[in-house]
Image: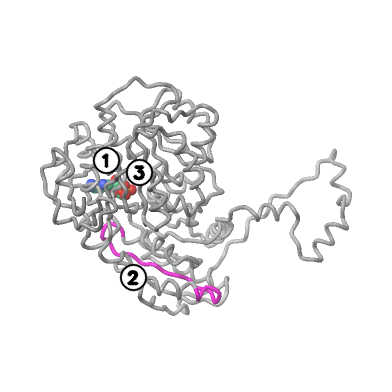
Amino acid sequence: MKGLGIKGLCQGLTFDTSQFVKPLDNVFNRLLIIIPGIGHGIEGSLMSNQEFRDFNLIKPIYRALRDMNYTNPTPVQLQSIPPLLAGRDLLGCAQTGTGKTAAFALPIIQHLARNQRRRERGFVRALIVTPTRELAAQIYENLNMYSKYLDVTSVVVFGGVKQNSQVKSLNKGVDILVATPGRLLDLISQGYIKLEKVEFFVLDEADRMLDMGFIPDVRRILKYLPNKRQTMFFSATLSPKIIQLSKSMIHNPIRVDVTPEKPVVELIDQRLMNTKTKQEKSTVLMNILKEQNVKKALVFTRTKHGANKLAKLLARADIEALAIHGNKTQNARQKALENFKSGRIKVLIATDIAARGIDVEGISHVINHDIPNVAETYVHRIGRTARAGCRGISISLCGPEENEFIRDIEKLIKQSIPVVDVKPYMTKVELNPEEPRPQVQNRPSQKRNVHKPRNPQGQNRRKQRGQASPGSQARRGNHNR
Ligand code: AMP
């Protein structure tokens, strides 16, 4: 099937995509889409000249797309929708921000709307599995918008919140389920979700699933799925491991690569600031954030604890900031994100995993408070600015122990990051006093607290050796991202 274009694959297609498509190999029906310009964002150079009208989509879907001001399909949509409508499996190499959600969602919605069935409690017809809660919520929102004129229902389930309302929605019967792996398996084991009748399965961000250790969960989920189904497998990168994984779930797929011609980093004004101590880092950061041109800044820290600490420090400098990471409740994460999106706060502090998949417009600055130790993460982080063809600024605050990470990054992006002098950013920032810690009051009845600790020797010995208490050690042993 070498070099087979979309035109040859799909019935009812009225356009020729050959100018976008280059045959690559015959392992899959593989298409490489060269996108002039950048790889992130939707407007401008990423849009094709084709229109959604060129697809065989039903009217209620067009109406919904019109409401959302989608006029032209993005390349990943252009290449995926026709073969998916024709029932093919798909292996897609595309990042968040390319329009991949609509690429898989529209054909699913169309099929479900055209082939209505009575909904059965617990059974789902389409399953979309995605690694993070934020991404799950985002996909769910999009599904609702695309299907707003149709009788196609969606539910989203993820961990970190109580399951009651999710179970309630599932009990009503549902067509499309968006889920993160852990909660999905939980609800399956409790009998609330049944996957035997799934007709469509989407695995989103497979490379992230791998990074986050979800692959065993994904394999368990696969065991519940019927063999006869249409599968769409998406990943931002296609390493041999990912290709291997994909082969266990897709059959004779069409392959779509949306590969940026130029790396996205070219639209970003990158700066490196060398600091000597942690305190210096914080001072420089606060001075940067106080500058006028910082409209919306996403600040990355390596750990959840670091994110919390930084949010507290910025509050003392009257800089409104919120932190999102895996230890925050889903509600807190959602609220922080909404406040950041709407501009109510100008600084969001995030760890890498929490920030995954977040699609926020107008981020003027990405600041690496900590330099990532994986070079690809740097590219991913700074790509949060300069979306939709706009320019953006990234600033990396580098401590002496992080120099080697910068060297790896520069090797990857094949350029050295211009160094900016930190001196102008070293002015002392006035900090408000720290909030006093809440005092634990001894109640008169709690006589035990009045006496000395029960095991003073043990505690003192630990102190002398500089060890933490067993409880705090266990807490630190948690995944700290
Ligand atoms: P995604 O990669 O699916 O997360 O999409 C990124 C952003 O692009 C989302 O805000 C979508 O609503 C938007 N989008 C997707 N497809 C189109 C399109 N054809 N035209 C305009 N915006 C789009």
Q: Quadrant of residue 408?
A: bottom left
Q: In the picture shown, does residue 422 fall above or below 112?
A: below
Gap in Å between the C-alphas at discs 2 and 1?
41 Å
Would you say 473 lies left or right of 170 here? Answer: right
Residue in view at x 46 percent, y 61 percent: 299
Q: Label 3 sits on what residue type?
A: Ile
Give the residue at mark 2.
269
Q: Is mark 1 within 8 Å of ligand 1?
A: no
Q: Which residues are magenta?
A: 387-404
The residue at the far top in this view is 118
Residue 157 locus on image (x, y percent): 46, 36
Residue 46 locus on image (x, y percent): 22, 56
Q: In the picture shown, does residue 139 fall above or below 152?
A: below
Q: Camera-side residue: 191 or 357?
A: 191
Residue 454 locus on image (x, y percent): 87, 50
Looking at marks 2 and 1 on the same chain, the residue that comes earlier in the sequence is marked by 1
Residue in view at x 41 percent, y 78 percent: 420
Gap in Å between the C-alphas at discs 3 and 2?
40 Å
**SS state under label 3:** loop
Q: Contact, CB < 8 Å: mark 2 with mark 1?
A: no
Residue in view at x 34 percent, y 54 percent: 95
Q: Is mark 2 within 8 Å of ligand 1?
A: no
Q: In the picture shown, does residue 256 fall above or below 299?
A: above
